[in-house]
Amino acid sequence: MFADMGGRTESAIRAHDARYRSWVRSRIQSGELVALLAEDRDRHPIATGSVWFRETHPTPHVASLKMPYILSVFTEPTARRKGTAGRIVRELVQIARSKGYEQVRLNASDAGMGVYAKLGFERTTEMRRYLNPKERRKARPIL
């Protein structure tokens, strides 16, 4: 996923993978995260996605102090444009809905923007600032 998004070295991705696996395992075990995996007919993984029920600050019109956040949605290049990512995201949204949450959030890559828009997600005004200029990747222009 991070290789496809660009701007990261192979060594940085490998280092991240070990940390991420540990982080995901502990949250799955606690029930704080639900991860889905799609396989092809030969049982090879082709797509994934997760919903993390993360803590948030009080917000008007939102009763919960947890905000479902969809992350790590990825489809193998050979399996793209077949609706798999959409099915995973719809299932993650349904999981959040079944737990009584009022909304779900995510950050979209350029490639995922269309998928999410078709599923009813709305663009927001979230921004970021890198505090270490060396960590900054090429930013999209503000429109």
Image (cartoon, rainbow, N blue to C red):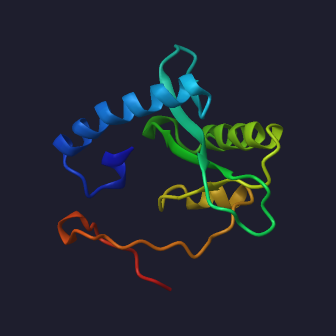
Which is more toward the observer, 2 or 67? Answer: 67
Which quadrant of the figure has residue 90? top right
User: Where does residue 63 sit, x and y in percent of width and height?
Assistant: 79, 57
Given residues 55 and 25, the one toward you in this image is 55
> Is residue 19 among the parts visible in the rendering?
yes
Residue drawn at the location 78% of the way across and 48% of the way down:
101
Give how far across and how far down residue 64 sits, in percent: 75, 52
In the rendered image, the quadrant that contains the N terminus is: top left
Q: Is residue 42 left or right of residue 131?
A: right
Going 48% across and 24% down the picture, which residue do you hit? 45
Q: Position of residue 133 (x, y in %)?
A: 21, 72
Between 5 and 33, the residue placed more toward the observer is: 33
The picture quadrant where one finds residue 53 is top right
**How many marks do you count on the picture?**
0
Q: Residue at x 60, y 34 (%)?
A: 32
Compared with 62, 79 (above or below) is: above
Residue found farthest to the top? 42
> Between residues 104 and 112, which one lies in front from this camera angle?
104
- Res 39 seen here: no
Q: In this rendering, is residue 134 above or below 73?
A: below
Residue lying at 53% horizontally and 34% vertically, measured from the top left: 48
Q: Where in the figure is residue 105, as x and y percent of width and height?
A: 63, 56
Identify the residue at the far bottom of this view: 143
Q: Is residue 44 left or right of residue 58?
A: left
